[in-house]
Image: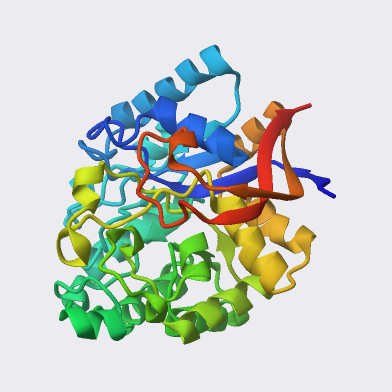
Amino acid sequence: MSRELSFPGFVDVHVHFRDPGVPEAETTQSGLAAARRGGFAAVVTMPNTSPAIDSPALVKAQIAKRDAWAKAHGPAPLLFPSACITKGRLGREVAALEALAEAGAAFFTDDGSYVSDDRVMEEAMRRAAALGLVVCDHALDPTIVAGGVIRDCPLSRSRGLAVIPAEAEAAAVRRDISLCRTTGCRLHIQHISTAQGVSLVIDAQREGLPVTAEATPHHLMFSCEALTDDDANFKMAPPLGNDEDRAALREAVKGGRLMFATDHAPHPAATKSRGFAKSANGITGLETALAATWSVMVEEEGMDPIAWARAWSAMPRDLLPEACRRAMDASGCRTHVSVGERRRVEADAFASLSTNSPYIGMEFDLAARIEQN
């Protein structure tokens, strides 16, 4: 017998809508449709579009697309755009953060790229701290990644695939936390994936630093040690961790140390059909995230459903500026989940324009929807 649960509206603070740039992969319209189907009341879009969202005009253009959606479909899901840390996401010069905030940027990130220059990142964090906004970082040091595409595992060894060491994440997280300590800026580590990274985040939280981090459904569900095929639907950045990494992530989520986020990353089929070595990073996630995290964290790990919901609602909501939180309150949107009826993930049922997903064919016990009071 199925049961219904209702929670404050869920928020995904990490989604990629390829608008502008690659509309065949995802538009704002299709992305918001996917968010609605997935049960999300609000999403934060990443700025690694083409062009990158590094100017007030481009932030306002994202908001205009949200408003066009609302006029046609109602206010939910809400879309809050993030903006670049650096001009063009090139890591060389801090963007006009003050103007971007005034235009409506929810927070700052160069997601997809790591800001390698310590001085640039420190300046950005000082300026963001003065604005009271969060800096989010894609914590993968490219000098350590060095062309890697996968963590060390049986598949990497059998196929001769270049490996990304866990230290690529740990080094970046270590640097970011040091700058958080120096600047007082709120820091959010995106899509954390290693036991080392998790340990560093928890140590920073125990120190009292304003550090948060997110775990994705795929890093919680899958381990690179179980990969058998050269299937790029399991390729992402950061890559899937090993069994130890996955266990550390699950334990940190259960302990209230990490929130959830999807890192929804749609791609045209052609860019995901060339194996680990040559395919693009990322998978779709908005329409499967709630079911996948419920399966892993509640059904397998015994996480309390209220705590599970908090990692999708109160924790990510706290990253948002006050104006975004007020907009969520005004929308009155809640996330409802139905548990207990087995459903199969089918590609032709996606609202997203892309189907690069490792979940296709899997079955879950949870379905979600959003409703306004």
At x 32%, y 62%, the residue is 236
Q: Is residue 232 left or right of residue 224?
A: left
Q: Is residue 363 left or right of residue 139?
A: right
At x 52%, y 68%, the residue is 221
Q: Nearer the viewer, residue 192 or 187?
A: 192
x and y, in percent, of residue 20 in the image:
26, 31
Q: Is residue 153 above or below residue 230?
A: below
At x 27%, y 74%, the residue is 150
The part of the image, by quadrant, that contains residue 7 is top right
x and y, in percent, of residue 139 in the image:
34, 68
Query: Is there any visible trace of residue 216 in the rendered image?
Result: no
Query: Is there any visible trace of residue 275 in the rendered image?
Result: yes
The part of the image, by quadrant, that contains residue 9 is top right
x and y, in percent, of residue 110 in the image:
30, 53
Q: Is residue 49 above or below residue 244?
A: above
x and y, in percent, of residue 164 in the image:
25, 78
The chosen color scheme is rainbow
Q: Nearer the viewer, residue 349 or 123?
A: 349
Q: Residue furthest top?
A: 71
The part of the image, by quadrant, that contains residue 160 is bottom left
Q: Quadrant of the C terminus?
A: top right
Q: Nearer the viewer, residue 324 or 355?
A: 355
Q: Nearer the viewer, residue 90 or 282?
A: 282
Q: Is residue 115 left or right of residue 313?
A: left
Q: Is residue 356 left or right of residue 276?
A: right
At x 58%, y 82%, the residue is 207
Q: Is residue 55 above or below residue 125?
A: above
Number of disc labels: 0
